[in-house]
Image (spheres, helix red, strand yellow):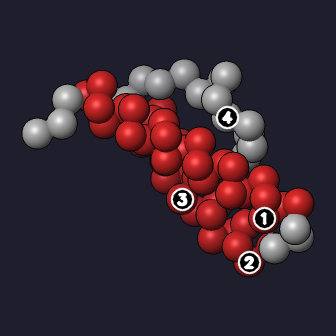
Amino acid sequence: MPTNGEIIERNINDFQRVQAHMMIARKENATETYESLKKDYRSLKAVLTSLGVNLTDIDEIKE
């Protein structure tokens, strides 16, 4: 069973990876891809917020 720290770390890594892909999709004007990634972004953001993670410094998209 993973610890809270491991869960938070995994979700932060996923959050940052999704954001990186969202920025690429935005740059390439891949609107469908961007919208699909935004669903993952919002879910990860909700999970991290519920775990008490301050997203101020790591949230580059801010949607």
Cα separation, mark 3 vs mark 4, equals: 13 Å
Q: Amino acid at mark 3?
A: Asp
Q: Which residue is mark 4?
A: 59
Comparing 52 with 6, the one in front is: 6
Decide if residue 63 is on the left or right side of residue 49: right
Q: Are marks 3 and 1 in contact (CB under 8 Å)?
A: no
- Alpha carbon separation for disc pair 2 and 4: 21 Å
> Label 1 crowding class (10 Å Cα cut-off): few <14, some 14-19, many 20+?
some
Q: Which residue is mark 1?
A: 25
Q: Quadrant of residue 55?
A: top right
In the rendered view, tell whether residue 60 sits above or below residue 30: above
Return the residue at label 2: 32
Under circle 4, the secondary element is loop
The first of marks 3 and 4 along the sequence is 3
- Neighbours of disc 4 within 10 Å: few (<14), some (14-19), many (20+): some
Tell me how far mark 1 sits from mark 4, CA to CA: 16 Å
Q: Amino acid at mark 2?
A: Glu
User: For the point 49% across and 53% down, which residue is it?
Assistant: 43
Asked if disc 1 and disc 4 are in contact, CB closer than 8 Å, the reply is no
Q: Are marks 3 and 4 in contact (CB under 8 Å)?
A: no
Rounded to the nearest angstrom, the CA distance separating label 3 from label 1 is 14 Å
Q: Based on the displayed image, in which of its 4 quarters is residue 52 positioned?
A: top left
Q: Left or right: where does residue 27 sit relative to residue 15?
A: right
| Residue most extreme to the left | 1
In percent of the image, x 20 and y 29: which residue is there?
3
